[in-house]
């Protein structure tokens, strides 16, 4: 039977016919891997559905998988065939291995024993999202930590006739921490996994009408990516499905389209978590007529971490509706020691809710569950590693009271079923980042183009392409750029400077007291040392601050030298041991970092970059030591390994940033500053 028998009701494009001929040949041949590539709307999923029916007619086993729960759910809905996440498909989720690592811990899920047919065909959708660099978090490691490696090892290792078909769009965003999509790169797969690879690319879009502004705009962006030329960007607003929107008109338009289509068919896509949070706050304020951050009935949430603790599995990227909101069921404030010997406290707030989630087959389930309430309004898209560790420490403390020891079967069983340790992690889902939107499509898509990466870069074009193609009916663009080769925003290379720049550290000033910065730092040191239980004594010889630290049997002395403009250098004496010296180093650094730096932008465009840059620095764990605002630039001084590091953002009279000028006493050897520069350039 021919594979074309399963497409008789369709008018196939020429490249679809060519692709099906190649796939039919692949399924009968010796090749192990097929790459079915195609841009958005070219009918990839339609072909996958027919391929599955063809395999079933040949009595050949097959399995559908996708990287995220939402992508798996959409794949199931479109094909009518059950799909799973890759993690659920290849890892042994029923056996969890625990390993203590000092003050931390880690759980491991190993690969399943592959007991599927030796002729099984694995069809993996949204393959552009599959990473092949080590990835874990504070808590979990799956297999080797490299998803593509584990997928290939699970499906293809051994003397079998199993095959893998990767389906995806290489123009979309690459996996996090990679600048290309390895699962859609035939050379990468053949070189690293020694597989024979076939591939085809679908190019003719069939999902939307030929007069679509979304299609025309996406095609223009796609062609730029293919040609690797990024000197022009434009959204076509001449068609009825594409709209240019001013920021101040957003709420009115959102309310109108969401009322007609529902919030489940309306989404706002942003570049940063901070901006998504702001949109969620605006929308909820309008929807509930209150500025209260508390969760409400009918709230729309997106799951941020797979949860297997209930009768229905909840996958990362799935959306759920809140039906009822209960009270706070439990609060905890675990304290624990982190790297550097410091003790921290994390607050965990648990709230009971009733949610509704839809299955692939349309069945609705109501689930009583517990959410981490204070995570809903956090800026981070994922739970902070300290909070994840706090969940485990809090769980261990409850088990200790029940005399259940870590490592025991009883402990592992309790861990898998505990409502608080397995708390549902979710965010408000009205506005999400572009990465979170991958694998989904909506009737109404609002895209905020406020991105602070180089707009003449492949990274920006892939971001824009991914965001625009989430729309299957209407696209609303906020602050979309319109430029040509004469427009420019350049992130320069790091410039090496010889000395520490004036004003690199912020200190509050006091009138008629030029040395107030000395007293301020003494106050900060006393505050920090008091929390750590460290005794401290000061002496002040000429232009020196001599400090003696003592904790139990540990002791040491530091001299801080200063001039009229600030501290200049330090000398260290008589420390009992290196561990105590390391602790005092962290105390001194913390005392130097300002608790708050005043920033008063003259113009609106400065606010957006300021918020994004602080978010970027927070992700890189790089503190800001001072901000100096000049007439035509803003200077951000940063705490890196160098004696002095900064980024200067220069703008012109048209309220456009001309360039960013990074500088460091270590030059390009300043790896932390280099990481910031790469992020600003759109390089992961």
Image (cartoon, rainbow, N blue to C red):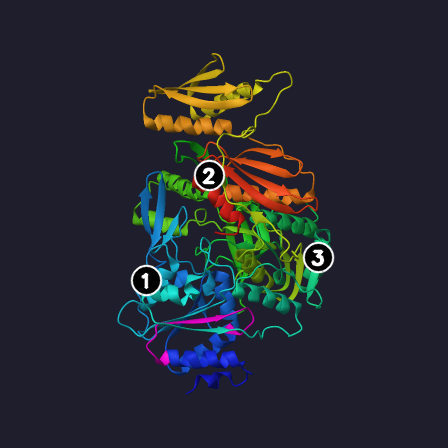
- Pointers 2 and 1 in contact (C-beta within 8 Å): no
Q: Residues within 10 Å of mark 2 (few under 14, many from 20)?
A: many
Q: For the N terminus, which image quadrant? A: bottom left
Q: Position of residue 13 (x, y in %)?
A: 54, 80
Q: Is residue 292 at least partly visible in the picture?
A: no
- Taking the magenta stretch, the answer to whether it contains residue 13 is no
In the image, which residues are magenta? 27-44
Number of other residues with Cα within 10 Å of mark 3, as a class: few under 14, some 14 to 19, many 20 or more: some
Q: Which mark is residue 112?
A: 1
**Label 3: which residue?**
245
Q: CA distance from mark 3 to mark 1?
A: 50 Å
Horizontal and vertical percent position of residue 31: 34, 75
Q: Earlier in the sequence, mark 2 or mark 1?
A: 1
Q: If you read the primary sequence from the N terminus, does the residue marked by circle 3 or circle 1 appear first?
A: 1
- Which mark is drawn over residue 667? 2
Q: CA distance from mark 2 to mark 1?
A: 48 Å
**Residue 455, which numbered label?**
none
Query: Where is residue 41, by image quadrant?
Result: bottom right
Q: Is residue 211 left or right of residue 159?
A: right
As helix, strand or loop, the secondary structure at mark 2 comes to: helix
The 10 Å Cα crowd at callout 1, few under 14, some 14 to 19, many 20 or more, is some
Left or right, 334 with reference to 464: left
Question: Looking at the picture, how far across and down is residue 641, in whole percent?
Answer: 44, 35
Q: CA distance from mark 2 to mark 3?
A: 42 Å
Q: Secondary structure at mark 1?
A: loop
284 or 19, nearer to the observer: 19
Q: Quadrant of residue 302?
A: bottom right
């Amino acid at each position: 039977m021919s594979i074309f028998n399963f497409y008789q009701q369709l008018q196939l494009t020429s490249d679809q016919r060519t692709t099906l001929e190649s796939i039919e040949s692949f399924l009968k041949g010796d090749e192990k891997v097929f790459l079915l590539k195609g841009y958005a709307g070219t009918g990839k999923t339609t072909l996958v559905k027919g391929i599955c029916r063809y395999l079933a007619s040949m009595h050949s086993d097959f399995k559908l998988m996708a990287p995220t729960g939402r992508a798996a759910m959409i794949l199931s809905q479109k094909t009518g065939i059950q799909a799973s996440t890759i993690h659920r498909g290849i890892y042994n989720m029923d056996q969890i291995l625990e390993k203590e690592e000092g003050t931390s811990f880690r759980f491991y899920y190993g690969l399943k024993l592959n007991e599927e047919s030796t002729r099984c065909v694995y069809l993996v959708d949204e393959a552009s999202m599959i990473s092949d660099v080590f990835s874990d978090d504070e808590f979990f490691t799956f297999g080797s930590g490299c998803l593509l490696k584990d997928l290939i090892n699970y499906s293809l290792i051994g003397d079998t006739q199993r095959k893998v078909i990767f389906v995806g769009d290489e123009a979309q965003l690459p996996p996090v921490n990679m600048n290309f999509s390895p699962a859609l790169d035939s050379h990468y797969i053949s070189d690293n996994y020694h597989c024979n690879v076939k591939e085809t690319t679908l190019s003719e879009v069939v999902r939307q009408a030929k007069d679509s502004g979304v299609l025309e705009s996406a095609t223009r962006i796609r062609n730029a990516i293919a040609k690797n030329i990024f000197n022009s960007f434009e959204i076509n607003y001449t068609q009825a499905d594409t709209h240019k929107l001013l920021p101040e008109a957003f709420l009115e338009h959102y309310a109108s389209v969401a009322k007609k289509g529902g919030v489940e068919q309306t989404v706002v896509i942003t570049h940063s978590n901070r901006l998504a949070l702001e949109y969620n706050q605006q929308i909820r304020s309008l929807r509930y007529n209150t500025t209260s951050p508390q969760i409400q009935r009918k709230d729309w949430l997106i799951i941020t971490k797979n949860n297997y603790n209930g009768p229905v599995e909840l996958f990362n990227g799935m959306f759920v509706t809140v039906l009822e909101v209960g009270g706070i069921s439990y609060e905890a404030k675990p304290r624990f020691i982190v790297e550097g010997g410091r003790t921290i406290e994390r607050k965990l707030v648990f709230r009971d809710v009733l949610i509704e989630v839809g299955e692939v087959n349309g069945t609705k389930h109501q689930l009583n569950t517990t959410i981490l309430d204070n995570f809903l309004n956090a800026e981070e898209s994922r739970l902070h590693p300290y909070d994840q560790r706090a969940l485990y420490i809090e769980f261990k403390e409850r088990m200790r009271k029940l005399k259940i020891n870590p490592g025991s079967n009883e402990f592992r069983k309790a861990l898998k079923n505990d409502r608080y340790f397995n708390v549902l992690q979710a965010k408000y889902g009205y506005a999400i980042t572009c990465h979170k939107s991958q694998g989904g499509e909506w009737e109404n898509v609002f895209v905020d183009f406020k991105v602070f990466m180089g707009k003449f870069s492949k990274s920006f074009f892939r971001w824009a392409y991914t965001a625009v193609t989430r729309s299957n009916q209407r696209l609303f663009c906020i602050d979309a750029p319109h430029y040509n080769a004469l427009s420019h925003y350049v992130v320069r290379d790091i410039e090496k400077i010889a000395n520490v720049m004036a004003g690199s550290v912020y200190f509050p000033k006091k009138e008629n007291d030029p040395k107030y910065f000395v007293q301020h730092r003494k106050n900060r040191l006393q505050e920090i040392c008091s929390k750590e239980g460290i005794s401290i004594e000061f002496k002040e010889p000429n232009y020196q601050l001599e400090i003696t630290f003592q904790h139990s049997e540990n002791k040491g002395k530091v001299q801080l030298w200063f001039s009229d403009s600030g501290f200049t250098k330090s000398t260290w004496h008589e420390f009992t041991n290196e561990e105590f010296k390391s602790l005092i180093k962290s105390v001194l650094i913390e005392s130097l970092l300002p608790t708050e730096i005043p920033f008063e932008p003259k113009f609106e465009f400065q606010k957006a970059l300021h918020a994004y840059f602080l978010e970027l620095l927070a992700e890189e764990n790089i503190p800001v030591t001072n901000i100096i605002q000049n007439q035509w630039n803003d200077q951000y001084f940063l705490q890196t390994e160098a004696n002095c590091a900064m980024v200067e953002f220069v703008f012109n009279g048209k309220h456009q940033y001309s360039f960013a000028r990074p500088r460091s006493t270590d030059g390009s050897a300043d790896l932390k500053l280099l990481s910031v520069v790469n992020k600003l350039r759109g390089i992961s």
